[in-house]
Structures are given as C-alpha cells and as structure tokens.
Image: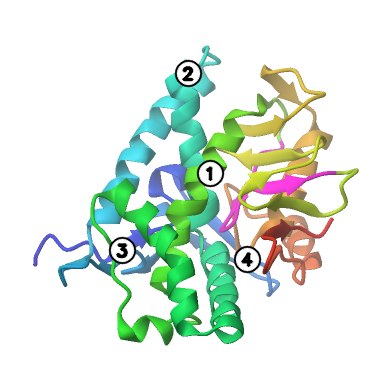
Amino acid sequence: MSNTKKKHHYLPESYLKGFTDSSSGILWVYLKCYSEVRQSSPGNEGYQKYYYAFFDTGGKRHTNTIEDFFSKIEGNYIRVLNKIHDRKNLSSQDRINLAKFVAFIQTRVPWFRSEIDKMAAEHITNVGLEEAKRNFASSLETMGKIIGFEPKVQDNDYQKLMSPRGSIFSLAQTFDAANNFYKQLLGLKWRFLFSSTSIKYVTSDNPIYYYSENDQVTTIQGDSIIGENIEVTMPLSKKVALVAKRKNIQAGYGDATGTSIKSINKRTVLGAKENIYTSFNDGTFMKFVHKYKDSRPYMAMVRRKMAHHK
C-alpha cells in the first residue's frame, strides 16, 4: 500500500523541532556511550520502522493505526505548548492533553518497551506461557479499547521479546501504563520553568525523569506515582521544562536559574538510553554526557519499580 507508514515515531518530529538550532534547524545528537556528536534533523531521529505494527484478532496487520492515534495526541500537545510559550492559563482539557502526551512519551520510548519485554520474558519463565498470556490479557484489552482494534498475540511474538522493535506485550503496556500515568500526573502541581539565560534545555530518547530526594530511588510502583516528595521533570522545548510535584511548588510559570536548568539537563542525561538531543554542538557538554554513559533507569518485576541513578 502506498500510504503505509513505515517510520513509527516514539519521539514526535514536532517535539524534537523544539530542540533544534533556531538559525539552521540542525538537531545535534550526542551518543551517550561514545564521545561523539553528530548532526541530524528531527525527521531522522526518534523512530523505528514498524515500531507500532500489530495484528488484530481478525488477522489484519495494522501499520498506520497507532501512528495515526499518536498524531492526534501530538497535535493537541503542540496547541498546549504554544499556550505555554505564551504563558497563558491552561484549561482543564489542556492539562489532560499535556498529561496524556507526557504519559505516552514515557511509555512509548524504546527504554520502557525493552524493560517491559525483559519483565515479560522473566514472567513467562516463572509462571509458564499460558498463565502469562492470561496475565497479559488485561493490557491487551486496554490497548484495544483505546485504539478501537483488539490486538492478537501471534505465535512469533514470544520470539520478539528481546528484539529491537519490541513485542505485542510491551506495545500493549504502552497503552495500559500511560492510561494510569496521565491520571497520576494530573494529581500533581505543575510549574513551567523558562530558560532566561544562554543555557538551553536538552532532551533525550527517554526524557521524563522521576526524582525523590527523601524516598531514595523508587519512583513508580503499580503504575502509580508515589512518595510525597516526588518530582517529575520533562523538557518541553529548549526554552521551557515541566516540573511536577505533589507539594513545595508554586504552580504556574517562572524563570529558571542557570543552576536549575543544568540540574534538569543532568536528569535528562542520566535517564537517556542512548541519545541526547540539543540545539548546540559543544565539546564540554559532550564530556558531560559521556561522564554518565553507564547511568540508566531500570525496572524490576513483581512490584513494578522504575528508578534512576542520582
């Protein structure tokens, strides 16, 4: 089919455009495990071929359905981002649209899906295939309700658990977990911190960071944001970042200090799986990125736990 979408984005092109150089449109990509940086563009980053492809229970292969679903969420996000850049008040629907965008970015990136697939493989080993299939049924059902097509587990999906593209299990969890995460995010107070200095925000292939100074490293359990001191950060563009907390924060807009921007950028680098995206090419920043080449978030079985190294 001529209209088949092959490039499935886990980081929207419209999102990455917010981190490009204003004059050239260049997106600089720092490789976390290597001391190098390359020049790129938003359209050439943040995607995998057929990343969201799946078969429904009728045997039809869907290549466009989920990519089209995310396009609508991304369109809503851009409208909210424009209001944020203008420091306008957000409506209740704006908050929902932003929360859904953030939640799906959290769950659709390769880091999250690969961690889910590792857990799925471990679970199958522990309880057996048939029991595991019953356990995954609710996630598949949630995905089906959201996108309008019920996915089917294929025989070769069990061989895809550790593949780069990911399995139907992690794809279903993209929807199941995000459906819970966005509601949790709405329960936090939001502050948007603008860069008022020459220091700009950066982003990554896993841009959402959960931090709790007093609760050590545990951040999410059972699809719930926990801890009274939890702080969620996500760069929305090179100009502004979202900071969400349960308490000790003033909701609304504010200007970030250089120190605050550097702190959020450090979290973004720590949480990255492989790539960091910026509007600048800077040797000092490259050394900073490489310094944290071995830092990764992780997820553990039984009581879902997602954590980051500090």
Provide the residue designation for mark 2: 92
Q: Position of residue 236 (x, y in %)?
A: 56, 37
N-terminal label among 1 and 2? 2
Tags 3 and 1 touching, CB below 8 Å: no
- The CA span between labels 3 and 4 is 20 Å
Provide the residue designation for mark 3: 7
- The CA span between labels 2 and 4 is 33 Å
Left or right of residue 81, residue 257 in this image: right
Q: Nearer the viewer, mark 3 or mark 1?
A: 1
Color theme of the render = rainbow
- The CA span between labels 4 and 1 is 23 Å
Check if residue 142 falls in the magenta segment.
Answer: no
Check if residue 207 falls in the magenta segment.
Answer: yes
Residue range (magenta)? 199-212
- Check disc 1 and give the amino acid type: Asn
Classify 10 Å Cα crowding around label 4: few (below 14), some (14-19), many (20 and above).
many
Classify 10 Å Cα crowding around label 1: few (below 14), some (14-19), many (20 and above).
some
The quadrant where residue 152 appears: bottom left
Provide the residue designation for mark 4: 273
Tags 3 and 4 touching, CB below 8 Å: no
Left or right of residue 5, residue 110 in this image: right
Q: Nearer the viewer, residue 25 or 156?
A: 156
- The CA span between labels 3 and 1 is 27 Å
Tags 4 and 1 touching, CB below 8 Å: no
Instruction: State which quarter of the image contains the C terminus.
Output: bottom right
- Check disc 4 and give the amino acid type: Lys
Q: In the structure shown, which secondary structural element does the residue marked by tag 4 occupy?
A: loop
In the image as oriented, which residue stretches furthest toward the left? 1
